[in-house]
Amino acid sequence: MGTQVSRIALLVSSLLGLSTFSAMATDTTVSNLDPINEIITVTGSRFDRTADQQLTVINTIEREEIERLSPKSVVDILETLPGVSVLRNGGAGQNTSISLRGSNSNHVLVLIDGIKIGSATLGSVSFNTLSPESIERIEVLKGPRASIWGSDAIGGVIQIFTRQLKGGEWFAGAEYGSDDYIRGSAGVGIDHGDGSSSFTLNHEQSEGYDVYNGGGSENDADGYQRNGLAIKGSQQLNPLWQVLWNGQYDRGFYQFDDIYASGAVDESDYENYLWNLGTQYSNDKFTSKLTLGQSRDYNENFRGDDSGVPVAIFETKRDQINWSNQYLASNELSFTGGLDWSKEAIFGDYAEDERDILGAYVLVQKQWSKLLAEVAVRYDDVENIDSEVSYNASLAYQFNDQWRLSATTGTAFKAPTFNDLYWPGSGNADLISETAENYDLTLSFTAKDIRAYISLFQNKIDNLIAWAPTGEKDAYGWDIWRPANINRAEIRGIELSANYQLFNLEHQLGYTYLDAENKQTGEQLVGRSENEFNYMLSYTWQQFDVLANYHYQGKRYAGFDEFFEAYHKVDLSVGYQLSDAWKLRLKANNILDEEIISAQNYFSPGRELFFSVNYKAF
């Protein structure tokens, strides 16, 4: 305990020292950082709010930074943020899971333009099917937000906003690199009266490499292909009414090695789509949004015998209706509330193949001089599962224009998946939801040339669902496994973030300390590291921009008294602006050629090189 207190004291003193220096240097620096009252986020309340109105930690990444990063997957973007951990089963096209502040990957709610995505059977999201080319902005909210969004938001919420171009704007790009990586993308914006629509296309493919180095693997390259089409638009009917729509279609495949025997399932083909249609009424005091949407995941798994017959087919669908409202009673008092309905449906030999979920929520925010308070409460009724009531309560005190201290507590839940409840021969229909209770204390500093914060957090999770053998055998002699609410976990940690700009040189650093314990066994949770650090340095000079990113991942517990070794990863991106429209970029990943293992016997790629040409008419 004494060691942990010393670490906390050291981090707090480091932040105070950094902030004091920055405040003293303000008058002599030139900063391009946006003022805090001009940074708009949506995920905390479902409505546009400036960052100084948010009482939870929300990290954002904009399109400009995404282009400089030149990522090959969504997780390449997310990994640069503090509190975000990535577990990869190989390279860009392989299965990957995301953890926020030590949470399970299925304890993270993922949205695309407000629509929940992910498998209703597995309860997780396939990040490898999403292309960075279609992304305009990402918001990552830390901590529970079930009081606004319902199930899954235990560790936090990741919301991806797709690109929307104005009429007359268009872009095109091409890229080639290691492992025969090829990318092509294009987009165009079209005006129609008092509205506009944008269309984007992207194609990516790679021959890949042999991702698995365990027994029974095939010694072959594991490639992937991604194809995407997206549309997003709006139409102003009159000064108060607006219609909005968006849709996304993704299709492709990724190859992988079976971990048990050569020749088993080694390719997964997927076809996913989502659409959303909504209307919004807004005046000076009141805003109301009604949206209808649907998301669908479809997967076929194939063996390595080239028979062309899938050995497994998985399909889930989610229909959604959301009605959200905001009333600004005054400059100091606002009310937000709404109703959500969704129907999850699966296709297969399950005892139950669909369920309805109904949720209602209300959020109140009140300002008193230097004090800002917020309370949110939500009720969820999940069919065949006990109902849940979730809440968040936050209080912030603004010491002056630069310093703010905020405290937050909240609860969240994760409803059991269809696999947990009804998997043929093994499901457990008596399961209840996993629940969590969270506490967060954040000290933040904001000035012209710096933004920084330090957060201390604790998350207690009960009724965790774990699968274990029952001692019974099936008709083929295999052990029967069945899930039960038997595990508990407690996660404590510190998160530090600082963004500092001096002339054309910008520094971004993030550090996370985690103590994630399985309360049943007393061991550390699998896949979590005690220390994780990211430092990004970017510089612009005339037609050149340079971005260097350093990522340190401490050793992780792998289970059975084994650990994944710590690693250092350095990426470098150099761009050259040929003209107002044309840009060249050279990207090198893992330039130190580190051997990176984040899942048992799965290797990330070594050193990689990529070259891209991009044209933007805006």
Image: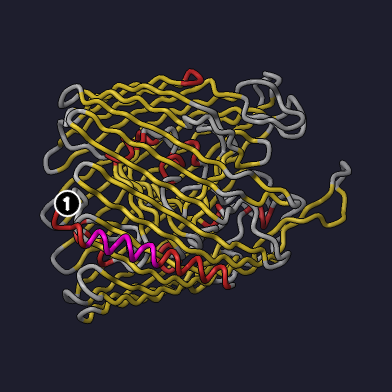
Q: Secondary structure at mark 1?
A: loop
Between 1 and 372, the residue placed more toward the observer is 1
Q: Quadrant of residue 530?
A: bottom right
Q: Is residue 369 above or below residue 208?
A: below
Residue type for callout 1:
Thr
Seen at 67% across and 40% down, the residue is 600
- Hey, which residue is sitting farthest bottom in the picture? 368
Q: Quadrant of residue 273?
A: top left
Question: Which residues fall within the magenta stretch?
Answer: 13-23
Residue picked out by circle 1: 29
Residue 399 % position (x, y): 25, 76
Q: Is residue 582 above or below residue 36?
A: above
- Decide if residue 70 is in sight here: yes
Few, some or many residues within 10 Å of mark 1 (<14, 14–19, 20+): few
Residue 55 % position (x, y): 33, 68
Is 240 inside the magenta-drawn segment? no
Q: Quadrant of residue 476?
A: top right
For residue 337, side relative to residue 427 (left or right) = left
Query: What colouring method underlies this structural image?
Result: secondary structure
